[in-house]
């Protein structure tokens, strides 16, 4: 296409400026974290002598070993279970017709724009004394895992259905003519092909679950050993910011770090999931 | 204009073979159903439906049920019918919280979409090289936990943080203020955080969308003598319709749902100037022990979100038909 050289340079300049603005707040908190309290940091102070002591202090004082463990257990379980469940629902909605499918699928779709904030109140009271079972799930991992599987399955169903619909029907037919059962078709023919789609779904669910805050605040605040990393950060920030902002900054960087690494290594999954997923229907 | 119209028609046959081959094949797939127990689909749906139903749908219905009671969360519930709702529509705090959400929608949804379109307009006239690099940076704010975002921006807005430091540097000392503690500026400051979180998503969405618009459409517009502005309105904007809709729905919902960032920066303050519905729901349910009322607030918020999302999509459909 035609465009003057000056126009190109200008456009790239604007693009670069916005890209820089996107990472600047993250850089600024990293710079702050690399200082120590005695540096009396202000404004743009660049860490000329980077110091990791704030990270060490934040890690122990904020109990982030526990926080990371909890977050990892919750995020990994939610990711694995909702991926398996979504393969099932996606397979059914994507390749079969069955009684009630045209009513059920929109109900799943609803879950994508669902404001799950509106569900925390009953979750809090029902988990205190689970109906029929009469057990208390508050301040356990289950309190975070179960509702987030429910939420993730909604998007997962939508995502995996789109994948299964994109598979050439001839593939399924051939396997069926060979006498494969519906599970055989899924397990031996479709799942091997679905690996990239499942990977993208897993990456997205893992990140959302890792970052989740309100459920943790309401459902596991009472137990320090079950606090997730973001909840730990919120508490730590409230307690330590006035005393030493560099420690809070370090804690924030720690909480963000796993996600940033996952993002840098599996970037195409994020972009595909968030753009294509949003546009598919 | 006529030229553009005809190119659109020419472009259509290119798409049809794919679509046509896809559709009958699915019908054939369905026709194959005899002999295969298709209702077995239920078996595959059931486990997922169980989790979704028990832990998402049922709590939502349960919320609506709670909203019909007066309840402190401890002692017995008292049935009050729609009293919580008639209180809600007269509750100034709640009404203000929705007005605040409206302001946040401007920052979370409108500004990022406009910003994204402006930049995209500048980039439609040539193929962007190295876009992947820019995309990496632009996408990052989307993925950072709200709690972390809140810490980063609390620092940026701090008394001696980067923003005030910058203002002092350029001689705007009178502008220096504790941004998140200022009655007038706290809400727009929160809004800017939302803009930061979402503008990258909008840009990536639009720029990758524009690269998919057939070049022939632009050529036709140029042959027709369209300038950059006209080109934007007759080619780029219609071409990005889907992307713009998605961006608006996602960001509007995010604005209405915003809790993490508000809770971890201003917690609704100062003086309730940044109170948003989800924060107000949280306060009523878990701090003021007004569980029934909080459930009513949650229900109203859910309805508003569904209605707005539906509206945006409906308007989108109509503009497509037109």
Image (cartoon, coloured by chain):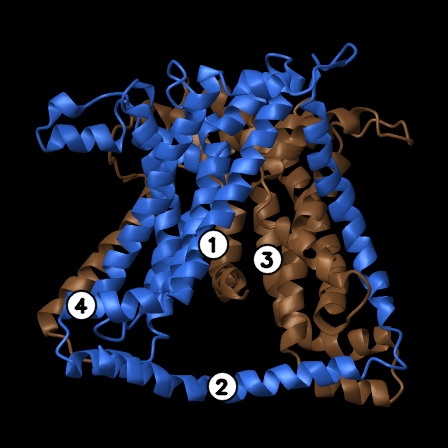
Chain colours: A brown, B blue
Q: Nearer the viewer, residue B273 or B143?
A: B273
The residue to which callout 3 is attached is A203
**Badges 3 and 2, same chain:** no
2 or 4: tag closer to the N-terminus: 2
Q: Residue A133 is drawn in which quadrant?
A: top right
Task: Please rate how many residues cluster around mark 1, counting C-alpha atoms within 10 Å: few if below 14, some from 14 to 19, many from 20.
Answer: few
The residue to which callout 4 is attached is B230
Marks 1 and 3 sit apart, C-alpha to C-alpha, by: 31 Å
Label 3, secondary structure: give it.
helix
Q: Which of labels 4 and 1 is toward the front?
A: 1
The residue to which callout 2 is attached is B16
Task: Please rate how many residues cluster around mark 3, counting C-alpha atoms within 10 Å: few if below 14, some from 14 to 19, many from 20.
Answer: some
The residue to which callout 1 is attached is B314
Q: Which of labels 1 and 3 is toward the front?
A: 1
The quadrant of the rendering that contains the N terminus of chain A is bottom left
**Badges 4 and 1, same chain:** yes
**Badges 1 and 2, same chain:** yes
Residues marked 2 and 4 touching at CB (< 8 Å):
no
């Amino acid at each position: 296409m035609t465009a003057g050289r000056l126009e190109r340079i200008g456009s790239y300049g604007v693009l670069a400026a916005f890209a820089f603005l996107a990472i600047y707040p993250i850089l600024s908190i990293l710079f702050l974290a690399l200082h120590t309290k005695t540096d009396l940091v202000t404004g743009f102070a660049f860490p000329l002598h980077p110091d990791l002591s704030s990270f060490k202090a934040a890690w122990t004082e904020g109990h982030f070993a526990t926080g990371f463990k909890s977050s990892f257990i919750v995020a990994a379980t939610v990711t694995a279970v909702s991926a398996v469940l979504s393969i099932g629902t996606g397979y059914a909605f994507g390749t079969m017709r069955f009684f009630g499918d045209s009513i059920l699928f929109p109900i799943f779709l609803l879950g994508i724009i669902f404001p799950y904030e509106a569900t925390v109140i009953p979750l809090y009271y029902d988990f205190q004394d689970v109906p029929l079972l009469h057990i208390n799930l508050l301040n356990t991992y289950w309190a975070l895992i179960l509702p987030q599987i429910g939420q993730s399955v909604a998007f997962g169903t939508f995502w995996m259905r789109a994948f299964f619909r994109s598979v050439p029907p001839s593939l399924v037919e051939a396997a069926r003519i060979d006498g494969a059962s519906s599970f055989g078709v899924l397990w031996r023919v479709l799942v091997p092909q679905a690996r990239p789609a499942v990977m993208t779904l897993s990456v997205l669910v893992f990140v959302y679950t890792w970052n989740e805050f309100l459920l943790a605040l309401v459902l596991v605040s009472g137990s320090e050993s079950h606090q997730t990393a973001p909840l730990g950060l919120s508490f730590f920030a409230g307690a330590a910011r006035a005393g030493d902002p560099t420690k809070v900054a370090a804690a924030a960087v720690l909480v963000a770090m796993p996600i940033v690494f996952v993002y840098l290594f599996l970037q195409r999954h994020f972009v595909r999931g968030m753009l294509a997923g949003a546009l598919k229907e | 204009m006529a030229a553009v119209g005809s190119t659109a028609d020419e472009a259509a046959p290119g798409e049809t073979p794919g679509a046509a081959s896809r559709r009958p094949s699915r019908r054939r797939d369905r026709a194959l159903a005899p002999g295969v127990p298709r209702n077995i689909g239920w078996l595959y749906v059931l486990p997922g439906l169980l989790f979704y139903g028990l832990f998402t749908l049922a709590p939502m219905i349960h919320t609506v049920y709670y909203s019909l009671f007066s309840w402190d969360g401890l002692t017995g519930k008292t049935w009050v019918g729609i009293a919580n709702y008639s209180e809600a529509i007269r509750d100034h705090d709640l009404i203000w919280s929705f007005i605040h959400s409206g302001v946040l929608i401007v920052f979370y949804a409108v500004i990022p979409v406009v910003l994204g379109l402006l930049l995209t307009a500048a980039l439609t006239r040539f193929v962007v090289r190295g876009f992947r690099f820019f995309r990496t940076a632009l996408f990052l704010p989307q993925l950072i936990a709200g709690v972390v975002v809140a810490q980063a921006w609390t620092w940026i807005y701090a008394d001696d943080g980067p923003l005030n430091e910058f203002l002092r540097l350029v001689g705007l000392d009178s502008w220096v203020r504790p941004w998140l503690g200022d009655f007038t500026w706290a809400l727009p400051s929160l809004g800017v955080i939302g803009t930061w979180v979402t503008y990258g998503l909008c840009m990536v969405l639009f720029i990758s969308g524009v690269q998919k618009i057939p070049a022939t459409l632009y050529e036709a517009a140029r042959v027709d003598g369209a300038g950059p502005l006209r080109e934007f309105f007759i080619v780029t904007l219609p071409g990005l319709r889907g992307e713009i809709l998605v961006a608006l729905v996602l960001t509007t919902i995010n604005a209405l749902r915003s809790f993490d960032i508000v809770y971890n920066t201003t917690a609704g303050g100062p003086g309730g100037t940044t109170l948003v519905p989800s924060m107000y729901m949280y306060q009523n349910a878990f701090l003021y022990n007004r569980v029934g009322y909080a459930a009513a607030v949650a229900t109203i918020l859910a309805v508003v979100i569904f209605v707005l999302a539906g509206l945006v999509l409906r308007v989108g459909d109509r503009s497509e038909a037109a």
